[in-house]
Amino acid sequence: PYDVLVVGGGPAGAAAAIYAARKGIRTGLLAERFGGQVMDTLGIENFISVPYTEGPKLAASLEQHIKEYDVDIISAQRATGIQSASADTNGLVNIPLASGATLKSRSVILATGARWRELNVPGEVEYRNKGVAYCPHCDGPLFKGKRVAVVGGGNSGIEAAIDLAGLVEHVTVLEFADTLRADEVLQRKAESLPNVEIIRSAQTTEVVGDGQKVSGMNYIDRVSGEPKHLAVAGIFVQIGLVPNTEFLQGSNIELSRFGEVIIDAKGATSQPGVFAAGDATTVPHKQIIIAMGAGATAALSAFDHLIRS
Ligand code: FAD
């Protein structure tokens, strides 16, 4: 068995594996796709101390750094569940894989990340990273002085609109429902900004562009049924982040109502010996540097658990 088995090969998992291996304990890292969301990212400008890098380059550096240590990398394999440590499992946590095999470890760090909920309209995939964006903290500055749209009137959408309003020329928020779901205080703030417009009952139907980049979007006014066009250079999709925790459903790992693994300040979950880090958890902000710090925290906590048990 492993001493620490990390499930996930994104920034959180990579940091956890390096911190664990540096303690000289038997460390495994299981990843369906090494690099995680970073592999889908073009420019990264907020990874502190690196003014600019690109996703695949950062993912390659993560792998290279892990390979400096004795970490058993099990890639292209998917965890399908978790069985907590008990007398039945000889005190080990079991991780069954889609292949039918089972990995066993004295402690586990869950770092399976998340994925953005997509609009699923024509043009979205074609113009991803060419105007269609999901992360205002990451890509907001690319649209400085331009007109953008934010799709989604929940907390993340309205926060994005307020954030972007300070950078871009104009923000139009499009909400599908006839009311916004965001907190009152955020709605009031957004409505007070002169360069933010909020359109309710708007169903996004298409992302349009010139073949190179986004030039606008089409939507239907759900009250009148009229088709409308909005000329924008950027479209921020803010309709939710879905944690990759489906495989934990039905286990005794406690999840939030959004499906995030509930962790404490040490990265501990509801089960002894099981820790978690990164976008799959209740951590309030989902960013590379934050996921890495959380991975380090979880690994140090797992080590602490091992020396006490
Ligand atoms: P992920 O990166 O999601 O990694 C999860 C890992 O778990 C992957 O290896 C995956 O294959 C694996 N996995 C999932 N389920 C299973 C399973 N059942 N079994 C085995 N393995 C599994 N952040 C920034 O700080 N700056 C940016 O500029 C930036 N730009 C972004 C642009 C885009 C398009 C996207 C999508 C995100 C961006 N982010 C950015 C956010 C950042 O990528 C995430 O916060 C970060 O990758 C989270 O790291 P993580 O390790 O928690 O999860």
Image (cartoon, rainbow, N blue to C red):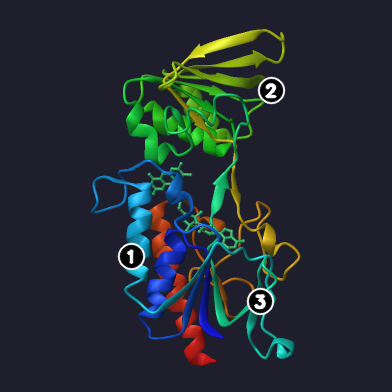
Identified at 58% across, 15% down, the residue is 218
Q: Earlier in the sequence, mark 1 or mark 2?
A: 1
Query: Is residue 146 found left or right of 36 in the rendered image?
Result: left
Query: Is residue 234 found left or right of 187 in the rendered image?
Result: left
Within the image, what quadrant is residue 225 found in? top right
Up-down: is 29 above or below 205? below
The residue that disc 2 covers is 178
Q: Amino acid at mark 2?
A: Asp
Q: CA distance from mark 1 to mark 3?
A: 26 Å
Q: Residues within 10 Å of mark 2 (few under 14, many from 20)?
A: few
Image location of residue 266, percent across then percent down: 48, 72
Image location of residue 32, percent across then percent down: 55, 60
Q: Check contact, mark 1 vs mark 3: CB within 8 A.
A: no
The residue that disc 3 covers is 102
Q: Nearer the viewer, mark 2 or mark 3?
A: 3
The residue that disc 1 covers is 64
Within the image, what quadrant is residue 309 found in? bottom right
**Whether residue 281 can be seen here:** no
Q: Amino acid at mark 1?
A: Gln
Q: Earlier in the sequence, mark 1 or mark 3?
A: 1
**SS class of the residue under badge 1?**
helix
Q: Amino acid at mark 3?
A: Thr
